Every structure is written in structure tokens, then in C-alpha cells.
Image (cartoon, rainbow, N blue to C red):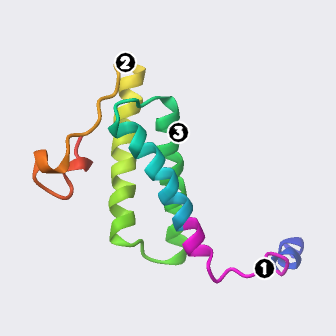
Amino acid sequence: MDQAERQKGSVGDLSDAKDRVELFALQLFQKADTEFRTGVATKNTLGKFRAACIIMEVLKQFGEMDEDIAQKYKFAKVWSARIYNDIKNGVQPLPPPALSEMGGANADCNP
């Protein structure tokens, strides 16, 4: 524990840490979402969604999640489970319907 306290000072400026973590999570989410919506979801897509979820969980350390992040977190969590099941069952994962087809902001979250 003493060693951790000594190293804490060498971490540097953390004033923009939340912004950097959020940016990384959103970039990862966007890559996975683009792959998924173009119909080429693979195990890599699944991994990106899961990693984005984990990184979004880290954002909770900085306080309440923004609404946009919370929606993306829910989307990634729900659809990564569906992609996993599809791959496990030997089925090509299908992208979610467009929001306009479902009629609602949270429509993409429902498998």
C-alpha cells in the first residue's frame, strides 16, 4: 500500500481523465456499432462491445454516467449478449432495426 501511495504522485495530471476515458469508450463503441449495423458482426465485434461496456463501467468512478453514455452502455450490453448467443448457435448476428422502424429512442436496446 505504501508503494501505491508513493507511485500515485507520478501519475500526473488527472483533471481530464474522465474525458479521456469517455472518449476511448465512445470510440470503441462506435467501431463495434458500425461493424454491427453493416451486418458484419463477428467475435471481434462482440469483444469491442464488451470492452466498451467495461470502460463505460469505469466512468462510474467519476460520478453519474451521462444519459448518452448510459444508453450506449445498455445497448452494448444487450446486443453483445445477443451477438454471443447467435455466434454460439452458429447464426450470423443480424443488426438491430433502425430507430425509425421501431419508433422510439430505446428501441435498439430491446433484442
Crowd band around label 2 with a 10 angstrom C-alpha radius: few (<14), some (14–19), many (20+): few
Say which residue label 3 marks. 47
Spatial CA distance of label 1 from label 2 is 47 Å
Image spot of residue 31 (x, y percent): 47, 46
Looking at the image, is mark 3 or mark 2 earlier in the sequence?
Answer: 3
Spatial CA distance of label 3 from label 1 is 30 Å
Q: Secondary structure at mark 2?
A: loop
Depicted 47 relative to depicted 66: above or below: above
Majority secondary structure of magenta residues: loop
Q: Residue at x 46, y 29 (%)?
A: 42
Depicted 3 relative to depicted 103: above or below: below
Answer with left or right where residue 89 lies relative to residue 110: right
Q: Hey, which quadrant is residue 89 in on the image?
A: top left
Say which residue label 2 marks. 89
Answer with left or right where residue 7 lies relative to residue 65: right
> Does residue 58 appear in the picture of this structure?
no
Q: Residue at x 37, y 57 (%)?
A: 72
Say which residue label 1 marks. 12
In the rendered structure, does residue 89 fall within the stretch colored magenta? Answer: no
Crowd band around label 1 with a 10 angstrom C-alpha radius: few (<14), some (14–19), many (20+): few
Answer with left or right where residue 45 lies relative to residue 76: right
Image spot of residue 12 (x, y percent): 78, 79
Q: What are the residue bounds of the magenta stretch?
A: 9-21
> Does residue 78 appear in the picture of this structure?
yes
Image spot of residue 95 (x, y percent): 29, 35
Looking at the image, is mark 3 or mark 1 earlier in the sequence?
Answer: 1
